[in-house]
Amino acid sequence: MPLTSKDLDDLRAARVLLENPGLAAKISDVVGSPLERGFAMLPKRWSDAVNDATRRAIATSLDVALRTLDAAAAGAAPSPSNRWHKIAAGTAGAAGGAFGLAALAIELPLSTTIMLRSIADIARSEGEDLASAEARLQCVQVLALGGRSGKDDAAEAGYFAARAAMARAVSDAARHFAQRGALHKGAPAIVQLIAQVASRFSINVSQKVAAQAVPVVGAIGGAIINTLFIDHFQDMARGHFVVRRLERRYGAEAVEKVYKEFGASD
């Protein structure tokens, strides 16, 4: 069955979101200078601190988000509360801007949990059943979109390549959930999922931290940067779950074929 004109428009809009300029470009437009200035101001071992904070944030947020998504699934407004989540993330970002890298271990888990709840809200609005482990884990996978892993080459930078890279880890984690009825952070399948998501999510976290390292940013700038941070992942979530909605209707192969045709015609 061919896609309707509305679904073609939805898929085209989703592709624009998923293949859009990255977070670094959006931050640079607002801050008014390239992020290299911020990177130069960070301590020598900042990368280790960011990577460690990222893994811990995903593990903590995964636990909190999955324990509270049942309540979110039950109550269900048809439209996601993007604005409320942006306000909450901006408030958390103000602390990061005021205290810099020292606040990352506290601010990042809070911001990531808010983002996961926002992502789940968007997923539900696109027809995902949040009672299923697979849908919940797709919410976590969104954190891996829009941030290239250091192992990626140019051919692996797109949306479907990122999904393919994560597919095994998501599938194994879903199987673990189905067998155990819960996600245990120490289980190999969950450790692998967190590691793969963190390798991509940390790229965007590094860009956020670099922007907040600029002295003139401060608390207000930190709030603005965190708002851009969550806005970026809300876009990734919207695009991802529109694609999944269309895949449920038309099949994954048909949707991917049309998606890539849009890219070839650009």
Image (spheres, rainbow, N blue to C red):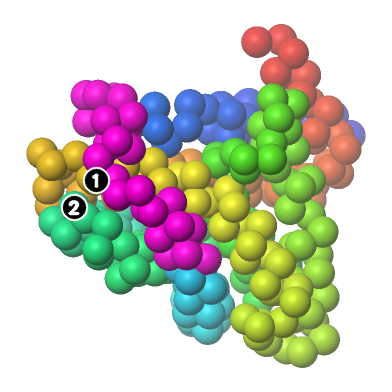
The residue at the point 69 percent across, 25 percent down is 154
| Mark with earlier residue (2, 1) | 2
**Stretch in magenta:** 27-55
Image coordinates for residue 79, horizontal then vertical, percent = 45, 55
Q: Are marks 2 and 1 in contact (CB under 8 Å)?
A: yes
Between residue 231 and residue 147, name the one nearer to us.
147
The residue at the point 13 percent across, 56 percent down is 98
Image coordinates for residue 199, horizontal then vertical, percent = 59, 52
User: In the image, what residue type sits under mark 1?
Assistant: Gln
Which residue bears the numbered disc 2? 97
The residue at the point 31 percent across, 62 percent down is 104
Query: Could you tell me which secondary element the residue under label 2 belongs to?
Result: helix
Pointer 2: residues within 10 angstroms few (<14), some, or many (20+)? many
| In the image, residue 119 above or below residue 165 | below
Q: Residue furthest bottom?
A: 180
Q: Is residue 43 left or right of residue 153?
A: left
User: In the image, what residue type sits under mark 2?
Assistant: Gly
Q: Is residue 93 left or right of residue 217?
A: right
Examine the image and state in which quarter residue 212 appears: top left
Q: Which mark is residue 212?
A: 1
| In the image, residue 4 above or below residue 225 | above
Examine the image and state in which quarter residue 145 appears: top right
Q: Is residue 107 left or right of residue 237?
A: left
Between residue 68 and residue 109, name the one nearer to us.
109
Instruction: Give the overall secondary structure of the magenta segment.
Output: helix
Q: Which mark is residue 48?
A: none
Give me the C-alpha separation between circle 2 and circle 1: 5 Å
Q: Residue furthest front?
A: 44
Is residue 210 part of the magenta span, yes or no?
no
The residue at the point 53 percent across, 73 percent down is 59
The quarter of the image holding the N terminus is top right
Pointer 1: residues within 10 angstroms few (<14), some, or many (20+)? many
